[in-house]
Image (spheres, helix red, strand yellow):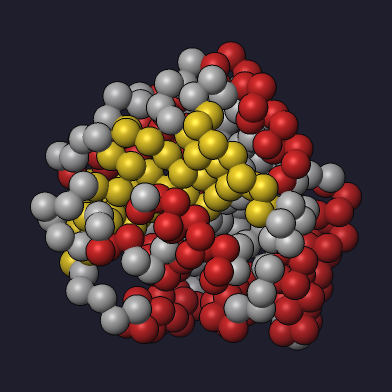
Amino acid sequence: MFKSKQGKKEILQLYDAKLDSLKIEYEYLTVQTSFGKTNIIATGDPANPPIIIVHGSNGCAPIALETYANLHKKFRVFAVDVLAQPNKSAETRLSMKDDSYGKWMNELIADLKIESVTMAGFSFGGLIILKTLEYDESNIKEVYLSSPAYIVNGNPLKAIFKVFIPMKRYMKTKKVKYVEKFLSHLFTDRDEFAIEFLSKVFLEFEMDFTPVPVIDTKAAKEITTPITLFAAENDILFPGKKMIKRAAKIFPSLRKSTLLEHSKHVQNKEQNEMIEQEIMR
């Protein structure tokens, strides 16, 4: 997935710098799954209840830890490096169309020997969590999904013009202004680390441009785990109002849904703190 050894080194240097900036005590855990080695960053008191946090596409565990920076005060946090993403896990790309992600996550949970697990995930991390529930939800206590993939999709033409074309222009010209342009459509507030990290990822990593599927209504209706949903009003990838409307129809276990006003796909610090408070409550 990494295009060169130097590119991988530079991406992982940014990974380490982000992790160091969090100023937390942590340990690396390695789980051998049937899909390859998975890296996990664990933090918080092992006596606390467990929570697994799952980052979005083209992300890594330190970004998830920064997004919900206080969870380690009440939980034993397991931040997972998703496979085939620019991070420290194996470069095995799983299919979004079958149950691979659900099987993989359940293997992690079994290996960690945890049960009654809370899960929280953003964007693509939401798809992974829903796939986990579809495959086997017996060890999951409840889930929190922020701007999740896999419930609805936005207008593909908007995504092409506002995200895909500027991304391709950047890959051709290496002019950072194109990264800034499309991230301005995705991020509620400007994020300097995201600009630096993704500028490197788009040039040095093989990204997955597979269309994101949506969950089957029948499968959604079989989920019994309580779901709390945060949908972003101005999300061009997974529109908030459309998401809340479909979620209310298909998830009998939907406990609460919140439309984040003035939020684009990626929430800002204040919105993430609100979500974090909801999880810790």
Question: In front here: 87 or 239?
Answer: 239
Q: In this orientation, does residue 30 appear?
A: no
In percent of width and height, residue 222 lies at 49, 15
Q: Is residue 12 left or right of residue 167?
A: left
Q: Residue furthest front?
A: 281
Q: Is residue 37 above or below residue 4?
A: above
Q: Is residue 30 above or below residue 12?
A: above
Residue at the spot 38% in from the left edge and 57% down from the top edge: 81
Q: In this orientation, does residue 271 appear?
A: yes
Q: How many marks?
A: 0
Q: Is residue 241 left or right of residue 76?
A: right
In percent of width and height, residue 41 lies at 27, 62
Q: Residue furthest left?
A: 47
Q: Is residue 266 above or below residue 130?
A: below
Give residue 187's quadrant in the image: bottom right
Residue at the spot 54% in from the left edge and 80% down from the top edge: 193
Give residue 135's quadrant in the image: top left
Residue at the spot 60% in from the left edge and 58% down from the top edge: 207
In percent of width and height, residue 189 lies at 66, 74
Question: In front here: 123 or 264?
Answer: 264
Q: Is residue 238 left or right of residue 99?
A: right
In percent of width and height, residue 269 lies at 54, 71
Q: Is residue 47 left or right of residue 203?
A: left
Give residue 132's quadrant in the image: top left
Residue at the spot 71% in from the left edge and 45% down from the top edge: 240
